[in-house]
Image (cartoon, grey):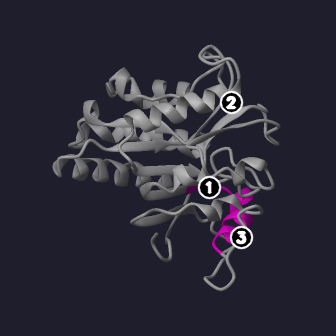
């Protein structure tokens, strides 16, 4: 894993979203120029939605061939396929469908229509990633909650200790809806680049806590799960001024 993360502080959430979208398009174009079909991991939340809108806006001027990009998710709410709680619905509407990403390249996590329960959904997604994944993500984007959670790995939750599976079923989530599917630490850490996307003053304490660790005094991942993921080549924290106010 890489050493210290790179920290970028942008004036506000809008500037942050534009910067992330531009950087992603550049990385995808570079990967395709090198002959790779890049696999990326998406997240949900308001800042991710803003990034997705900027991807759609900026893509026509980029060199990215969206028919040669493969999309996965770090986590998803285990709800009905048409529920507005599903991260996949927003991503499809905002940029995946408008940019023409082929359906066979979009690997959404199972809904309640696809699996009998959340554990079966996690097992199915694990199998799908093993069969169709590239071995690692080119870029994995993660949001961070005010409690320091990432994906659907929450502080103190048993899912934090699952290291022999690709994805895990989460029940009793402290944040509704209560059932979710999440990639595990071991899967999330198979990423060349990990990007944390964080905006707002409510996240400032979580950001500060996640970045407070040292080699001699690492952060307890059970208390701040965001400290448990880093890229194989690089880790970048994309922050706005408010979310960076504690560091």
Residue 157, relative to residue 128: is it above or below? below
74 vs 20, nearest the viewer: 74
For residue 146, side relative to residue 1 (left or right):
right
How dense is the environment of label 1, judged by Cα within 10 Å: few (below 14), some, or many (20 and up)?
many
Q: Which of the marked residues, 1 or 2, is nearer the chain's N terminus?
A: 2
Residue 56 seen in the current view: no
Q: Which residue is mark 2?
A: 119
Q: Which residue is mark 1?
A: 199
Between discs 1 and 3, the one toward the N terminus: 1
Element on which disc 3 rests: helix
- Tell me where the magenta segment starts and ends, as one range: 197-211
Residues 103 and 14: in front is: 103
Q: Quadrant of the C terminus?
A: bottom right
**Residue contact at pointers 3 and 2, CB within 8 angstroms:** no
Position in image of residue 135 (x %, y %):
38, 47
Between the residue at mark 3 and the residue at mark 2, the CA separation in whole angstroms equals 31 Å
Magenta run includes residue 222: no
């Amino acid at each position: 894993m890489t050493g210290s993360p790179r920290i970028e502080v942008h004036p506000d959430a809008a500037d942050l979203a534009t910067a992330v979208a531009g950087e992603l398009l550049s990385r995808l174009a570079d990967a395709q120029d090198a002959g790779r079909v890049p696999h990326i991991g998406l997240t949900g939340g308001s800042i991710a939605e803003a990034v997705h809108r900027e991807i759609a806006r900026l893509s026509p001027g980029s060199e990215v061939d969206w028919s040669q990009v493969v999309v996965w998710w770090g986590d998803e709410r285990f709800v009905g396929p048409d529920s507005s709680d599903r991260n996949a619905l927003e991503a499809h509407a905002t940029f995946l469908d408008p940019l023409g990403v082929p359906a066979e390249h979009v690997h959404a996590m199972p809904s309640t229509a696809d699996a009998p329960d959340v554990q079966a959904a996690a097992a199915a997604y694990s199998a799908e990633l093993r069969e169709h994944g590239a071995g690692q993500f080119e870029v994995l984007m993660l949001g961070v909650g005010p409690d320091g959670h990432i994906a659907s790995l929450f502080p103190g939750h048993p899912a934090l200790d699952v290291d022999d599976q690709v994805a895990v079923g989460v029940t009793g989530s402290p944040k509704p809806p209560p059932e979710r599917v999440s990639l595990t630490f071991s899967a999330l850490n198979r990423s060349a680049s990990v990007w944390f996307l964080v905006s707002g003053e409510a996240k400032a304490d979580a950001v500060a806590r996640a970045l407070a660790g040292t080699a001699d005094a690492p952060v307890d991942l059970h208390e701040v799960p965001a400290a448990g993921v880093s890229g194989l080549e690089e880790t970048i924290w994309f922050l706005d001024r408010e979310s960076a106010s504690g560091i």
